[in-house]
């Protein structure tokens, strides 16, 4: 077992039914609209302000706020602020949440 910082960008690990990661989004960036398929997702903002658009509804999340996203639900995370947004996500499902979650890969590419 490895203990890691939740602020470390990228994967926080993956099990048989869950995976997690940390995302750093620069101002003006988004993760991109996606669904985690059969996976359910939980997002917790560590720093900054996020706008999570879930099933077409905008939700403002400040540091220490969280949101649950049901399976088969299109969503996106935006950083409309002037500072970096840092958040962690966890996706759980029968396939480890291996749906279309682009969080770590897209955010890293845009970093």
Image (spheres, helix red, strand yellow):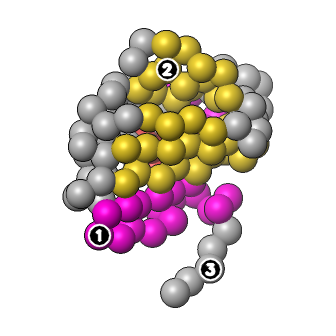
Provide the secondary structure element on which disc 3 rests: loop
Of pointers 3 and 1, the one earlier in the residue sequence: 3
In the rendered structure, does residue 29 fall within the stretch colored magenta? yes
- CB within 8 Å, label 3 to label 2: no
Residue 44 falls in image quadrant: top right
The image shows residue 88 at horizontal and vertical percentages of 58, 50
Which range of residues does the magenta coloring cover?
6-30
Q: CA distance from mark 3 to mark 2?
A: 31 Å
Residue density around tag 3, few if under 14, some if 14–19, many if 20 or more, within 10 Å = few
Asked whether 88 or 55 is in front, the reply is: 55
In the rendered structure, does residue 97 fall within the stretch colored magenta? no
Q: CA distance from mark 2 to mark 1?
A: 28 Å
| Apparent side of residue 94 relative to residue 27 in the rendered image (left or right) | left
User: Which residue is denoted by mark 3 in the rendering?
Assistant: 3
Q: Residue at x 38, y 35 (%)?
A: 70
Work out which quarter of the rendered image holds the C terminus and state it. top right
Q: Residue at x 51, y 65 (%)?
A: 12
User: Which residue is denoted by mark 2 in the rendering?
Assistant: 53
User: Which residue is denoted by mark 1 in the rendering?
Assistant: 16
């Amino acid at each position: 077992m490895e203990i890691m910082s939740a602020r470390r960008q990228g994967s926080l690990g993956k099990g048989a039914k869950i995976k997690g990661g940390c995302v750093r989004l620069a101002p003006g960036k988004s993760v991109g609209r996606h669904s985690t398929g059969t996976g359910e997702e939980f997002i917790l903002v560590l720093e900054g302000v996020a706008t999570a658009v879930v099933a077409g509804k905008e939700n403002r999340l400040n540091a220490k706020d969280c949101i649950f996203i049901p399976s088969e639900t299109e969503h996106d995370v935006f950083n409309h602020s002037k500072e970096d947004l840092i958040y962690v996500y966890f996706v759980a499902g029968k396939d480890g949440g291996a749906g279309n979650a682009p969080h770590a890969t897209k955010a890293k590419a845009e970093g």
